[in-house]
Image (spheres, rainbow, N blue to C red):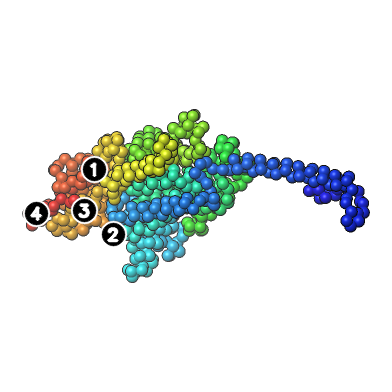
Amino acid sequence: MDDRGHSFPVREERVQAGDVAPHHVRGEVARRWRQGGRRAASRCTRWRQSGESRAAEYTPGPDMTSSTTADPHEHSARRALVASVFLVSAVLRLAAVDRPLNIDEALWIRRGGAFVAALARGDLFATYTRPHPGVTTMWLVGLSDVGACAVVGHGSWESCAQRLAADPLPPLAAYVVPRCVQAVFTAALLALMALLSVEWLGLWPAALGCGLLALEPFFLGYQRFITTDALATDLGAVAALWFLLYLREGNRRRLALSGLAFGLAVATKLPAVLLAVPLLISVVVMESGGWPRFPARGFRRRALELTVWAAVGMAVVVAIWPVLWVRPIGMLRQLQADLGSETQANAFRSDDTGCAFYVRALAWRFTPLMQAGALISAAALLWPAWRRRSPRRAELEGLAGLVLVPLVLLRLAGEAGVDRYLLPVVPFLALLAGAGWDQVRDRVASRWPRPPAAILVPAAVVVGQLAMLLPHLPEGITFYNPLLGGPAAAGHALAMGQGEGLERAAWYLNAEPGAASRVAAVPGFESAFAPYFRGRTIEVSPASLDAWVAADRVVLYIRQMQTGWPDATLVAYVASQQRPLYTVRRHGLDYARVFAGPIVVPAELREAAPPRAVP
């Protein structure tokens, strides 16, 4: 019988025991065996060639082996990288966790309280507050602050939530608790991003990229604030990396996890949906043959997969946003109406100067090491000779799309230019920078093959990045590119100040005699000042400009001195009448100036010795 199960037409002959088979029978059997062997060998050759072609199609570039085939040393290196990213990120977020404050944080603390209060009384439609929509932020702030209040016995869940929602100037403790929770959560997301980055780029590029990201001052500053930016950025990065890994290597679990993270990101901040556009472009490029190493499955199958991915994301949004359980159509109409007003630039946003804004912000807001690494990767993609030799061309193109496309779409959507709108693309920019510095490391290692030479570049990058971060801790956002002149020069190019430095002005006033009976006016920034001040803080806004006349101390912030908000005449009048009693000076800039107010200070307080300067 041959290898297909067919019988040989061998003539039957009886052979007695001990007889030798006839010669023609032995020859026929041998011939059949040789034919079967040749056919089997031919099939093995075809299978081997087919397997090699599939391996060439699926195999990642150098240093991008699958986690199932990595050697024990690489497994240990991955674990060390993930643990290091988590620990460093958590420490940098928890250090001096009570300062500085961002002016938007008080809004999200009140919204978190209102969210939990609406749940407690069963008014699910009231869980819609803004079109951001900030759902994950409200869950985090509401559960942590209201839960802490209830646990220590300050009231029931509903009463604690109502007090939190009604307080226009929350106490400092209301900031610290959710900041600690968010610090652990965002540090865990960055560790997960490091793990996914190793799979996408390889160990060294991922390590360099995550190191740059964890120590990037501008990125770290906003990761510490209780706003929607931190969670939306980290969740969006994880979702995009999971999606790209699914395109290259398959595994439907990755697709589902990407949809879950993407849904959480969109529920946190609506502009995160823009990340879907470069991901869809990646699918088109791959299916069109632009990335030969990625397996093409056909547009019809991809459409089905994308439908599943989007359905998972939508299901997550519905699951965590109670308003969608009761009045989805009404909420969508309200969301559409509110978005129209949100996208209009207002007087407080003075940075909107056209398409060139993001170019200037990229130049000023990031360290030279981040910029240089990203430029090296850009050159590797644009220069034809380098592009042909790049083993990670498809991976770098995917990351570059995640940087460029959202920025273009933001401008087309008419978003006012604010530097924090860069945050969703920063993780991908950091990974591009890590890949760029890894190319430098490879070049150094090829010229000087001794092991210390290969470690020199990563060590220099991390030490240099840390050296630029340390002078700006704990704020982070006070950093501006020193090659362009640093913060002192940046004041002529960008609107500055989110509330950092006001705690020092409050400390100065707290050291004055009778501080508890003082009244301070801080136009537009009272929420970042009041939690530190022992006296009373009054609000000065366009609707209440005359309120400042009731203050015996007026604090002008750098943003007001740049823009004149909320009233240029008021700011100019206060600043021109007298010399400041105290100036908060940081990195060559006057961040805040304390002036005497129109209310006459009692004689016994005027004659007291002035407080010493705050360090």
**Residue at the spot 85% in from the left edge and 44% down from the top edge:** 27
Find the distance from the CA under tag 3 to the CA under tag 2: 14 Å
Q: Nearer the viewer, residue 347 or 10?
A: 10
Q: Nearer the viewer, residue 193 or 334?
A: 193
Q: Amino acid at mark 2?
A: Pro
Residue under numbered circle 1: 587
Residue under numbered circle 2: 171
Query: Residue 603, percent across and down?
Result: 8, 55
Q: Amino acid at mark 4?
A: Ala
Query: Residue 319, percent across and down?
Result: 51, 57
Front tag of 4 and 2? 4
Q: Amino acid at mark 1?
A: His
* Mark 3 vs 4, N-terminal side: 3
* Mark 1 vs 3, N-terminal side: 3
Residue at disc 2, secondary structure = loop
Q: Are marks 3 and 2 in contact (CB under 8 Å)?
A: no
Residue under numbered circle 3: 506
